[in-house]
Image (cartoon, rainbow, N blue to C red):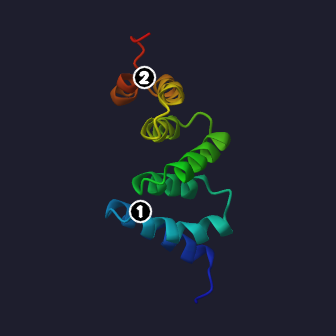
Amino acid sequence: MAEQTPETHVIDFRAAEQLLAARDPGGAVKLLDSVIAAHPENTAARLLRARSFFAAAQLRPAELEFQIVLEREPDNAFAHFALARTLQRANRPDEALRHFRLAAALDPRPDYVEAARFDAP
């Protein structure tokens, strides 16, 4: 196996983006594992891995990754929204609604606001 360098990690990250776009989330996760092992502080890689887990319907790992991102970036509206979608798919609607509302409060995009259901009790 070739030695991993910062350059190969960037290449792996970009390849993982392409794999996710090509609907191969499992392949994306495999590439990101080594990137995150070498750079555990890299929030972008963790967010991409969380999205990949979500796309692969691996909800618990997705949830954990989104939570790590939010610990580091509590104002990341996308991470709140994606965590909410993850919780929604896991049949945890009350927890999901909280994160939908946080996402909408941080970024009032129409899809975030609609999911937040501010007009509902």
Q: Which amino acid lies under the numbered mark 1 shown in the image of this protein?
A: Pro
In the figure, 45 relative to 85: above or below? below
In the figure, 43 relative to 114: above or below? below
Q: Which amino acid lies under the numbered mark 2 shown in the image of this protein?
A: Ala
Circles 1 and 2, Cβ within 8 Å, touching? The answer is no
Image location of residue 38, percent across then percent down: 67, 69
Which residue occupies the extreme bottom position in the image? 1
> Which quarter of the figure is the N terminus placed in?
bottom right
Give the camera-side residue of 89 and 65: 89
In the figure, 71 relative to 48: above or below? above
In the figure, 90 relative to 117: above or below? below
Of the numbered discs 1 and 2, the one sitting upstream in the chain is 1
Q: CA distance from mark 1 to mark 2?
A: 27 Å
How many neighbours does mark 2 have within 10 angstroms: few (below 14), some (14-19), or many (20 or more)?
many
Give the camera-side residue of 117 and 102: 117
Q: Is residue 69 left or right of residue 117?
A: right
- Residue located 48% across and 35% down the image: 84
Q: Secondary structure at mark 2?
A: helix
- Residue located 54% across and 66% down the image: 32
Residue 68 numbered tag = none
How many neighbours does mark 1 have within 10 angstroms: few (below 14), some (14-19), or many (20 or more)?
many
- Residue located 34% across and 60% down the image: 21
Image location of residue 4, percent across then percent down: 62, 80
Residue under label 1, please give it: 25
Q: Is residue 57 left or right of residue 71?
A: left
Q: Is residue 53 left or right of residue 1?
A: left
Residue 116 numbered tag = 2
